Amino acid sequence: ITFSIHQCMEPSPPSAAEPAAAESASPATEASAADHLAMTSNRTQCKREESQSLISESMDLSPRVEIDVELKVPRTILTPELFKAVAACLAFICIGPTLILTNRYILKELHFDFPIALSGIGLLFTSLAATTLLRVVRIVPREHSQIVTPTFITVNLAPVGAGMAATLAFGNSVYLYLPVGYIQMLKALTPTFTLLLLWLTRIEIPSARVVIATAGICLGTLIASIGAGSPSLLGLFVMLMAEVTEAIRLVLTQKLLQNLRFGVIEGQYYLAPISALWLFSASAILELPRALNSHAIAIPLKHPGYFLLSASLGLSVNLVASLVIKLTNSVTLKVLSTARNAGLVVVSALFLHERVTLLEFGGYTLALVAFGWYNYFRMHKL
């Protein structure tokens, strides 16, 4: 803001002796009278300009102040970074449920009831994609190639890969026995098993508030289970194993890979083939004889599009989750995961015609609230 001061100079008013002098002046002093008339006109003009400036708010006062203000238009909040973050969050919310519904369709509608083999196919696709990006196209660097020795693979990566394989196998198997919505409700128990294993291994000692929030999650899930009626006991066991193996995988990752920061592509480059080997080995023992007798091996050849979609979505989930963390933070990812599971409960009730009782819904709501407090306490270390 700049201020410039301008004084409107006015001549001083004539004294009382001036009129008498003017009356006694001779015609020879006409120049002096003309000067007096000019000063009077100047004074009148100055007052007229002052009045006009007050009316027009031009700040042309006596003294006149001119104010120049530079207006800066703020940048819009709709930045490209915001659009990228919103797009990544929407993709994360949509891809996960699409993968779940696609796998359910393959397992139940196409009658390819071999969840271990289905999980192995997805990880085989992920391994090929990661290898292409790192070794063929080379758009992603291998930052830990010197660390990943045969000993490191055996001691560190193989156990984590086994945990990942078990999580995927049990996670896909449960859709053969339990409704989609009920499975999403039971997933709220994952923090409970994770916290228990962290405490048993002395990696982390939870606070009293975290324990109370975890108890709220358990209570809400128990109420939801009571409201669900009489679910399959085999399905509950498979879901329990999926929760436990997921917790084991998280603890092993934190214990064995805590000082390493693998990128999502590089991490899948090392872990996906190991997990696929575990899965195909288990499938050869548990599923292959039955698949040969029922000629189920022809199903992927008959419907390749669904299997390719499932494998592509499996890779996309990891990529988009990493992108969400990069553009926002890990807390946003947890919130989105919770919202996604809750949304899938609604979708299963509306479009898959799965029955959700009021008691079941109330228990799940309690579990979600407790889960929110659990994340808040852990994030702020309360």
Image (tube, rainbow, N blue to C red):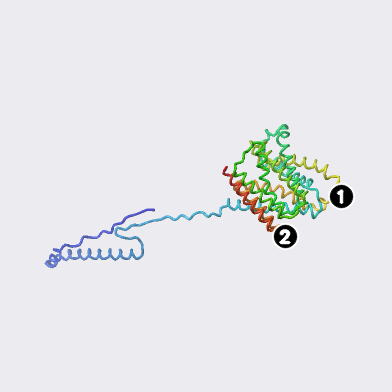
Q: Nearer the viewer, residue 210 or 339?
A: 210
Residue type highlighted by circle 1: His
- In the rendered image of this protein, does residue 197 appear above or below residue 224? above
Dividing the picture into quadrants, the one containing residue 21 is bottom left
Residue type highlighted by circle 2: Phe
The numbered disc on residue 64 is: none
Q: Earlier in the sequence, mark 1 or mark 2?
A: 1
Residue 313, percent from left and from top:
71, 50
Dot 1: element: loop
Q: Which residue is mark 2?
A: 351
Q: Around disc 1, counting alpha carbons within 10 Å, would you say few (fewer than 14), some (14 to 19), or many (20 or more)? A: few
The numbered disc on residue 295 is: 1
Residue 213 appears left or right of 102:
left
For the point 84% across and 50% down, the residue is: 298
Residue contact between numbered discs 1 and 2, judged by CB atoms under 8 Å: no
Residue 40, percent from left and from top:
22, 65
